[in-house]
Image: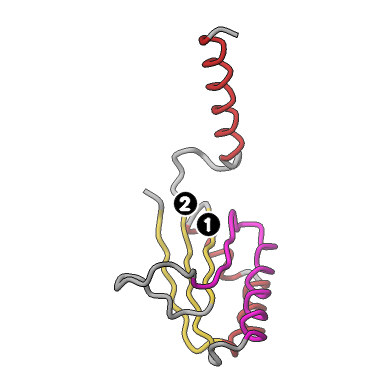
């Protein structure tokens, strides 16, 4: 295979991979809304409470306006002054728009999550940002 053919094959494969990685429903220049939430448990270190909160958060994926959902716990990264790992559980959701995020807030599954799990946390901090 000539070097030209290899370059063509490789560039075509890279383009196909990029197309698969981009959600078909999202316009390439549409600003996405990122909804980041950090939870501090009333009983820090309680694995049962943490697991119940994680399960509740993961169940929210059934809400169709959520494009992506990541649920996590603090990473064991290098300790630095700029890192706040005092929270117990975090979640990151991606929405196509502010309207979709509002739909999520009002959705019965989100309301059920709050009713079922709010007794688990002592503090919640939310950061919403738009992609630029």
Local secondary structure at mark 2: loop
Q: Is residue 97 left or right of residue 56?
A: left
Label 1, on which residue?
Answer: 94
Query: Considering the image in quadrants, where does the N terminus appear?
Result: top right
Which region is colored magenta? 47-74
Farthest residue toward the top? Answer: 2
Kindly indicate the quadrant of the structure image that contains residue 79: bottom left
The x and y percentages for residue 46 are 60, 88
Farthest residue toward the left? Answer: 81
At label 1, counting other C-alpha atoms closer than 10 Å, the crowd grade (few under 14, some 14-19, many 20 or more) is many
Q: CA distance from mark 2 to mark 1?
A: 7 Å
33 and 44: which is toward the camera: 44
| Residue drawn at point x = 59 percent, y = 60 percent | 69
Labelled pair 2, 1 in contact (Cβ < 8 Å): yes
The x and y percentages for residue 93 are 54, 61
Q: Which mark is residue 32?
A: 2
Q: Is residue 69 left or right of residue 33?
A: right
């Amino acid at each position: 295979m000539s070097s030209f053919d290899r370059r063509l094959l490789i560039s075509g494969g890279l383009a196909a991979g990029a197309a698969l990685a981009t959600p078909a429903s999202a316009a390439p220049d549409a600003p996405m809304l990122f909804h980041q939430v950090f939870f501090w448990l009333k009983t820090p270190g309680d694995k049962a409470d943490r697991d119940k909160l994680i399960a509740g958060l993961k169940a929210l994926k059934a809400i169709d306006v959520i494009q992506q959902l990541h649920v996590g716990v603090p990473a064991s990264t290098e300790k630095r002054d700029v890192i706040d790992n005092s929270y117990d559980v975090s979640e990151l959701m991606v929405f196509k728009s502010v309207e979709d995020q509002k739909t999520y807030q009002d959705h019965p599954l989100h309301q059920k999550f709050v009713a079922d799990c709010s007794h688990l946390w002592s503090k919640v901090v939310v950061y919403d940002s738009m992609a630029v």
